[in-house]
Amino acid sequence: MKCPYCGQLNNRVVDSRLSRSEFAVRRRRECLDCMRRFTTYEKVEDLPVMVVKKDGRREEFNRDKILSGIKKACEKRAISVDQIEEVVDSVERDFRDANEKEISSTVVGNKVMELLHRLDDVAYVRFASVYREFKDVDDFIEELKSLIPRKILEDKKPDGCSDDG
Protein backbone atom coordinates (compact mmCIF):
# COMPACT_ATOMS: atom_id res chain seq x y z
CA MET A 1 0.00 0.00 0.00
CA LYS A 2 1.42 3.35 -1.04
CA CYS A 3 1.77 5.98 1.71
CA PRO A 4 -0.53 8.94 0.92
CA TYR A 5 2.02 11.33 2.44
CA CYS A 6 5.36 10.33 0.95
CA GLY A 7 4.37 7.83 -1.75
CA GLN A 8 6.61 5.04 -0.49
CA LEU A 9 5.43 1.42 -0.36
CA ASN A 10 7.28 0.53 2.83
CA ASN A 11 4.66 0.35 5.62
CA ARG A 12 3.29 -1.96 8.26
CA VAL A 13 -0.16 -2.71 9.65
CA VAL A 14 -0.48 -1.39 13.20
CA ASP A 15 -4.11 -2.36 13.87
CA SER A 16 -6.88 -4.28 12.07
CA ARG A 17 -10.55 -4.53 12.94
CA LEU A 18 -13.96 -4.81 11.33
CA SER A 19 -15.46 -1.50 10.32
CA ARG A 20 -18.76 -0.43 11.88
CA SER A 21 -20.66 -1.69 8.86
CA GLU A 22 -18.89 -5.05 9.09
CA PHE A 23 -18.53 -4.93 5.29
CA ALA A 24 -14.87 -4.00 5.47
CA VAL A 25 -11.70 -4.42 7.48
CA ARG A 26 -10.25 -1.17 8.77
CA ARG A 27 -6.46 -1.14 8.92
CA ARG A 28 -4.22 1.46 10.55
CA ARG A 29 -0.89 1.53 8.80
CA GLU A 30 2.39 3.22 9.58
CA CYS A 31 4.79 4.29 6.85
CA LEU A 32 8.27 3.09 7.72
CA ASP A 33 9.84 5.93 5.72
CA CYS A 34 8.02 9.05 6.96
CA MET A 35 6.56 7.42 10.13
CA ARG A 36 3.08 8.87 9.50
CA ARG A 37 -0.04 6.79 10.02
CA PHE A 38 -2.99 6.36 7.69
CA THR A 39 -6.13 4.26 7.47
CA THR A 40 -7.13 1.87 4.71
CA TYR A 41 -10.26 -0.22 4.22
CA GLU A 42 -10.37 -3.64 2.65
CA LYS A 43 -13.61 -5.14 1.43
CA VAL A 44 -14.77 -8.01 -0.72
CA GLU A 45 -15.38 -7.01 -4.28
CA ASP A 46 -19.01 -7.75 -5.02
CA LEU A 47 -20.69 -8.11 -8.34
CA PRO A 48 -22.48 -4.83 -8.89
CA VAL A 49 -26.17 -4.56 -8.13
CA MET A 50 -27.87 -2.60 -10.88
CA VAL A 51 -30.62 -0.12 -10.05
CA VAL A 52 -33.38 0.08 -12.64
CA LYS A 53 -34.54 3.69 -12.87
CA LYS A 54 -38.15 4.74 -13.52
CA ASP A 55 -37.32 5.46 -17.17
CA GLY A 56 -35.75 2.01 -17.64
CA ARG A 57 -32.11 3.11 -17.48
CA ARG A 58 -29.78 1.00 -15.39
CA GLU A 59 -26.98 2.24 -13.20
CA GLU A 60 -24.77 0.60 -10.63
CA PHE A 61 -25.98 0.78 -7.02
CA ASN A 62 -24.26 3.81 -5.55
CA ARG A 63 -23.99 3.95 -1.78
CA ASP A 64 -22.69 7.52 -1.92
CA LYS A 65 -25.77 8.69 -3.80
CA ILE A 66 -28.03 7.34 -1.06
CA LEU A 67 -25.77 8.77 1.63
CA SER A 68 -25.90 12.20 0.00
CA GLY A 69 -29.70 12.20 -0.19
CA ILE A 70 -30.07 11.10 3.41
CA LYS A 71 -27.56 13.69 4.63
CA LYS A 72 -29.55 16.43 2.91
CA ALA A 73 -32.77 15.17 4.48
CA CYS A 74 -31.14 15.08 7.92
CA GLU A 75 -29.54 18.54 7.80
CA LYS A 76 -29.97 20.52 11.02
CA ARG A 77 -31.63 17.56 12.74
CA ALA A 78 -30.38 15.82 15.88
CA ILE A 79 -29.20 12.83 13.87
CA SER A 80 -25.63 11.62 14.19
CA VAL A 81 -23.38 10.61 11.33
CA ASP A 82 -23.39 7.11 12.82
CA GLN A 83 -27.19 6.96 12.59
CA ILE A 84 -27.06 8.08 8.97
CA GLU A 85 -24.39 5.48 8.22
CA GLU A 86 -26.55 2.81 9.88
CA VAL A 87 -29.43 3.65 7.55
CA VAL A 88 -27.20 3.47 4.48
CA ASP A 89 -25.57 0.25 5.74
CA SER A 90 -28.99 -1.29 6.28
CA VAL A 91 -30.16 -0.38 2.77
CA GLU A 92 -26.97 -1.71 1.22
CA ARG A 93 -27.00 -4.88 3.33
CA ASP A 94 -30.62 -5.67 2.45
CA PHE A 95 -29.96 -5.44 -1.26
CA ARG A 96 -26.66 -7.32 -1.15
CA ASP A 97 -28.21 -10.07 0.99
CA ALA A 98 -31.10 -10.42 -1.45
CA ASN A 99 -28.57 -11.59 -4.07
CA GLU A 100 -30.50 -9.81 -6.80
CA LYS A 101 -28.61 -8.54 -9.82
CA GLU A 102 -31.14 -5.76 -10.40
CA ILE A 103 -33.37 -3.78 -8.10
CA SER A 104 -35.95 -1.11 -8.84
CA SER A 105 -35.17 2.46 -7.80
CA THR A 106 -38.67 2.50 -6.30
CA VAL A 107 -37.72 -0.33 -3.94
CA VAL A 108 -34.55 1.53 -2.95
CA GLY A 109 -36.42 4.78 -2.31
CA ASN A 110 -39.15 3.06 -0.33
CA LYS A 111 -36.58 1.28 1.84
CA VAL A 112 -34.82 4.58 2.59
CA MET A 113 -38.15 6.22 3.45
CA GLU A 114 -39.11 3.33 5.72
CA LEU A 115 -35.86 3.63 7.67
CA LEU A 116 -36.00 7.44 7.84
CA HIS A 117 -39.61 7.25 9.04
CA ARG A 118 -38.39 5.23 12.04
CA LEU A 119 -35.49 7.61 12.64
CA ASP A 120 -36.95 11.11 12.24
CA ASP A 121 -40.27 12.35 10.83
CA VAL A 122 -38.83 15.62 9.50
CA ALA A 123 -36.00 13.85 7.67
CA TYR A 124 -38.58 11.41 6.31
CA VAL A 125 -40.80 14.18 4.93
CA ARG A 126 -37.81 16.00 3.45
CA PHE A 127 -36.63 12.86 1.68
CA ALA A 128 -40.15 11.95 0.58
CA SER A 129 -40.73 15.42 -0.86
CA VAL A 130 -37.80 14.99 -3.22
CA TYR A 131 -38.20 11.28 -3.89
CA ARG A 132 -41.95 11.49 -4.55
CA GLU A 133 -41.53 14.82 -6.35
CA PHE A 134 -44.02 16.85 -4.30
CA LYS A 135 -45.45 19.55 -6.56
CA ASP A 136 -47.08 21.85 -4.02
CA VAL A 137 -48.06 22.37 -0.38
CA ASP A 138 -51.01 20.00 -0.75
CA ASP A 139 -48.58 17.13 -1.33
CA PHE A 140 -46.80 18.00 1.92
CA ILE A 141 -50.09 18.24 3.80
CA GLU A 142 -51.19 14.82 2.58
CA GLU A 143 -47.90 13.29 3.68
CA LEU A 144 -48.07 15.02 7.05
CA LYS A 145 -51.60 13.74 7.59
CA SER A 146 -50.23 10.22 7.42
CA LEU A 147 -47.76 11.08 10.19
CA ILE A 148 -50.08 12.87 12.57
CA PRO A 149 -52.40 10.63 14.56
CA ARG A 150 -56.06 11.35 13.84
CA LYS A 151 -56.68 12.15 17.51
CA ILE A 152 -54.26 15.08 17.41
CA LEU A 153 -55.96 16.48 14.31
CA GLU A 154 -59.37 16.26 15.99
CA ASP A 155 -58.09 17.96 19.15
CA LYS A 156 -56.80 20.89 17.08
CA LYS A 157 -60.21 21.69 15.50
CA PRO A 158 -61.65 25.05 16.56
CA ASP A 159 -64.64 24.97 18.92
CA GLY A 160 -67.93 24.44 17.18
CA CYS A 161 -66.45 22.50 14.26
CA SER A 162 -67.46 18.91 13.78
CA ASP A 163 -67.20 16.20 11.20
CA ASP A 164 -70.97 16.30 10.76
CA GLY A 165 -70.75 19.30 8.49
Image (cartoon, rainbow, N blue to C red):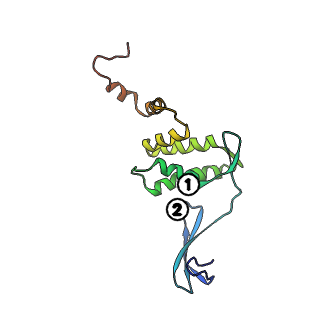
Nearest to the observer: residue 148 or residue 61: 61
Residue found at the far bottom of this picture: 33
Q: Residue 68 at what x, y percent from top left?
A: 53, 52
Asked whether the residues under the numbered discs 1 and 2 touch, taking CB atoms below 8 Å apart as contact, a structural biologist would say: yes
Which residue appears at 32% of the width and 23% of the height?
A: 157
Which residue appears at 60% of the width and 52% of the height?
A: 92
Question: In which quarter of the view is residue 17 placed?
Answer: bottom right
Q: Residue 16 at what x, y percent from top left?
A: 55, 73
**Left or right relative to 29: residue 124:** left
Question: In which quarter of the view is residue 161 placed?
Answer: top left
Which residue appears at 29% of the width and 22% of the height?
A: 158
19 vs 98: above or below: below
Q: Residue 127 at what x, y percent from top left?
A: 50, 43
16 vs 147: above or below: below
Q: Report which residue position mark 2 lands on.
A: 20
Q: Report which residue position mark 1 lands on.
A: 89
* Label whose residue precedes the other's in the sequence (1 or 2): 2
Q: Secondary structure at mark 1?
A: helix
161 vs 75: above or below: above
Which residue appears at 47% of the width and 47% of the height?
A: 73
**Left or right relative to 8: residue 152:** left
Question: In which quarter of the view is residue 19 placed?
Answer: bottom right
